[in-house]
Image: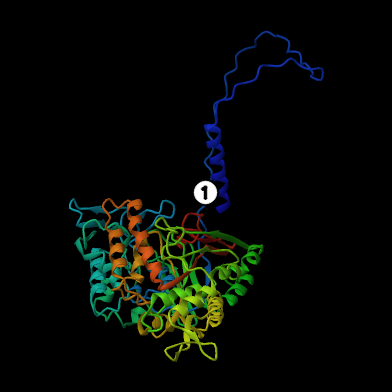
Amino acid sequence: MYKLLCLLSVTVVLVFIVACAAPVTPEPTKAPTATTVAVAPPATTAPGPTVAPKPTEVPKPTETKAPPKGGTVRRYLTGNAISMNPMMTSDTTSTGLQDWIWAHLVKRDPVTLDIVGVLYEDKPTFSADGKTMTWKLRPGLKWSDGQPLTSADVEFTWKTMMDPKTKLRQRATFEGAFTDVKALDPLTVQYTLKDVGFCPAADQSDLIGVLPKHIYEKLDINVNPENTKPTVVNGPWLFKSWAADDQFTAGPPNKNYVLGEPNIETVSYRNVKDAVVALQLFKTQEIDIVSPAALDWEEVKKLPFASTYEYYTPGASWTYIGFNTRNPWLADKKVRQAISTAIDVDGMIKNIRLGLAKRQYSLISPTNWAYTDDVPKFPYDPTKAKQLLKDLGFTPGPDGILQKDGKPWPKMRIFYSAGTSEREKIATIAQENLKAVGIPLEVVAEESAAYSERRGVTRDMELFIHGWSPGVEPYGTGEVFQSFSTRNHSGIKNLEFDKLWDQASYTPGCKQADRKVFYVKAAQILADEQPYIWIFATPELVAVNKRLTVNPMTPLGVLYDPSKWYINP
C-alpha cells in the first residue's frame, strides 16, 4: 500500500507539472528531407451507408474484497508494564499495551493532524465566552459487556482522576487545563476551562480515555483486580491475559468497538531480554514487527520477508540524559553545563545511530512546528569542560578525581531501563567521557518498572537516561519541567519558564506562529538551565513481516490504527 501511495503521489506531481507548464507554440511544418518517405493519401471512395455506433458499455465496478479476518499479530516487550489501568501509569510500556484494549476519546487525524473524535464525534464546540468546551459522544456506544457507554462514564473518570487519593501522575497537566468535566445529558460532556482561551483544550480533552463507571465505582481505584485483569473494556480487543516478565495477550476482537470490529483475532506479546533477542526473533519470523537499533537497520532492510519504513513524525521522540538537580553536586546549572560540554553527543549520533538522528538542544523536537535552534548550546569540548569545572573550584586529586574544598566528587550513578542496548551504549560513552574530566560514574541497568519507580517516586538517582514522545502539541512536554509537576523527574524549578509555557497555551487567537514566540523563549531558558542533556531526536525505524498489512504511510507513520491491520492470506 505504501508503494501504491508513492506512485499516486508521483502521478499527481506529474499532472501538476503538465497542467502548469507554459503553452507550447508548434514549430512550422518542414519540407521532407531526402531521407523522408512521402506516403500518398488514400484514394477517394463513395460514402457507404451510415452505421449506428454501438452503445457504450458501462465498465463493471472493480471488485473490492474485504480484508481477511483472523490470525495473530506477534509482538515483543523488553520491559514490564505497571498496570492495565491507564489512570495508574504514564510509562510507554504500559500505555503501549493499554491501547489494544482501551479506546481514546479523541485522536490526531493521521493525515491532517487535526484533533478528531473517536468515542466523541468529530469536533467540539466552544461557548461564546470561551469558558467551556462541549463534546458529543457518538450515539449507541457500548462497553464490551453490552452496557451503554455514556457521559456519566466520562464524568466519573474525571472525578476519579482529580481525587487526591488517586495515584495519578499526570494530574498537574489536567489541573492546568480544566476545572471541571461534567455530563449534561447521556451524550454531552462539558469541559470547563481553567482559563479562557486555552489553546490545547481539544488535545487535552482525551483525559486518560474513559473507564467504565459501573465496574470501578465500587472499587479502590489504586488497588483492585481490574487493574491487572480488566473484564470490561472499550478498545479494539478484549483483554485476555498479562503476566509480568512473560506475556500479554488481547483477543478476541471487541464487537462493540467504536471504529468497527478489528480484522485480526489476537494480539500476542512476549517478554524478551533485550532488543538483540527481539531482532533475532524477527529474523526467524517469530515476531511480526520490530524497531531495530540503527546499527542493524541496513541489515534488516535486506531481509526478503520484511517491509521497512523510516520516517520522522511531527513530534519526533527524543532521548536524553537527565540530571537530578536536587543533588547538591548537580544543583548549580554551571556544573550541569560543564558536564554537558564533557559528553560527546555528536559521537553518539555517529557511532550509535550511524547518523540516523537529529541533534537536539532543547525540549522541543527539531521536527515540531514550535522548534527553534536559537538556544544555548554546549557542544563537546573536553578541554573547555575541564576549564569550566576549574573555574567552579574543582581540581583533580591524586587519583585524578575532581575535588572541591577537600571533598572528592562522589561516585555518581547513571540509570537506564534494562534491555535497551542503545541506552546502554549512551551510558557507557557518558561514563568514559566524564572519567576523562575527573568525574566518576557508575552505569546501572534496571528493570523497567523499578526504573520508573525510581524516576517518578523515590528520586534516588544522580543521572538517568530516558526518552520522550512529545506528539504534535508541545503543551504536555512542559509538565516534565514545570516547578509544580509530579512528573518533573529532574526537580528543575524556574518560574519564568513556567510563566512562558502557560503564555504559549493561552495566546489570543491560538495561531501557531504567535504561540511559538513564547515556546522559543521558554526553550531558551530551559536550555540554559540544562536539566537534561537533550541528545537527539530519532526517526521511526519500523520493520514489518510481509505476512502482515499495516496502515498506509502518513505523517504519523504506518502503525496508527491496528484495528485496520490484517494478516495476508
The image quarter containing residue 469 is: bottom left
Q: Would you name the residue on which mark 1 appears?
A: 64
Amino acid type at mark 1: Thr
Colouring style: rainbow
Packing grade of label 1 (10 A; few <14, some 14-19, many >=20) is: few
Q: Nearer the viewer, residue 178 or 143?
A: 178
The count of marks equals 1
Q: Position of residue 472 (x, y in %)?
A: 40, 59
**Side of 519 where 154 appears, left or right:** left
The image quarter containing residue 117 is: bottom left
Q: Nearer the viewer, residue 480 or 491?
A: 491
Q: Position of residue 272 (x, y in %)?
A: 54, 79
The image quarter containing residue 140 is: bottom left
Q: Residue furthest right?
A: 34
Q: Nearer the viewer, residue 275 or 416?
A: 416
Q: Is residue 288 visible?
A: no
Q: Position of residue 552 (x, y in %)?
A: 51, 54
Q: Residue at x 36, y 71 (%)?
A: 480
**Side of 207 where 49 appears, left or right:** right
